[in-house]
Image (cartoon, rainbow, N blue to C red):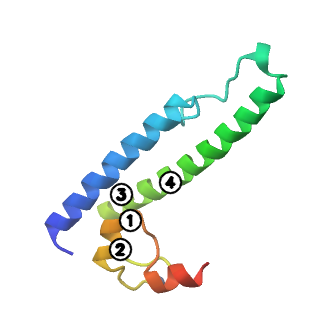
């Protein structure tokens, strides 16, 4: 993959990482934020339901953030673009569509 493609992908990943961290922070569930809800409303079932939704959303955001950070680490150590399962190259078109992709198309469809 060309250096300019890698630079574009790195910029996309960094932007995505910033967005994810911001979203988590807004939820009060970022890495540095304790799970802290107003005690006065803790017993309301509506809040419980909302908290469940927020935790599910935060879980998804955290998973995505981890994938993005892994992809950035791989860019740094030069292993970016290699399938984690078969170690074959991941097609550039797939990486451009999904920069944090861990698997090539064949392995991704197998793991489903
Ligand atoms: Zn593979």
The residue drawn where x is 16% and y is 72% is 2
Give the foreground label among 1 and 4.
Answer: 1
- Say if 41 sits above or below 84 in the image: above
- Element marked by disc 1: loop
- Between the C-alphas of marks 3 and 4, the distance is 12 Å
In primary-sequence order, the first of circles 3 and 2 is 3
Residue that numbered label 4 is attached to: 64
Give the foreground label among 3 and 1.
Answer: 1
The residue drawn where x is 45% and y is 43% is 20
Crowd around label 2: few <14 · some 14–19 · many ≥20 (10 Å):
some
Pinpoint residue 7: horizontal percent, then vertical percent. Answer: 20, 59
- Element marked by disc 2: helix
Label 3 with label 4: CB-CB less than 8 Å: no
Q: Quadrant of the C terminus?
A: bottom right
Label 1 with label 4: CB-CB less than 8 Å: no
- Element marked by disc 3: helix
- Between the C-alphas of marks 2 and 4, the distance is 17 Å
Specify the quadrant of the image occupied by residue 93: bottom left
Pinpoint residue 55: horizontal percent, then vertical percent. Answer: 67, 40
- Say if 27 sits above or below 60 in the image: above
**Label for residue 98?**
1
Crowd around label 4: few <14 · some 14–19 · many ≥20 (10 Å):
some
Give the foreground label among 3 and 2.
Answer: 2
Label 3 with label 2: CB-CB less than 8 Å: no
The reply, left or right, for residue 56 in relation to residue 18 is right
Residue that numbered label 3 is attached to: 72
Instruction: Farthest residue to the front: give it.
Output: 46
Label 1 with label 2: CB-CB less than 8 Å: yes
Residue that numbered label 2 is attached to: 94
């Amino acid at each position: 993959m060309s250096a300019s493609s890698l630079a574009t992908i790195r910029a996309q990943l960094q932007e995505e990482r910033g967005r994810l961290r911001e979203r988590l922070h807004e939820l009060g569930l970022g890495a540095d934020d304790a799970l802290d809800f107003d005690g006065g409303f803790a017993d309301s079932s509506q809040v419980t339901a909302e908290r469940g939704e927020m935790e599910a959303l935060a879980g998804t955001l955290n998973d995505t953030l981890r994938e993005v950070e892994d992809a950035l680490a791989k860019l740094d150590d030069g292993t970016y673009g290699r399938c984690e399962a078969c170690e074959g190259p991941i097609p550039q078109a797939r990486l451009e569509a999904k920069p944090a992709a861990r698997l090539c198309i064949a392995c991704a469809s197998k793991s489903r």
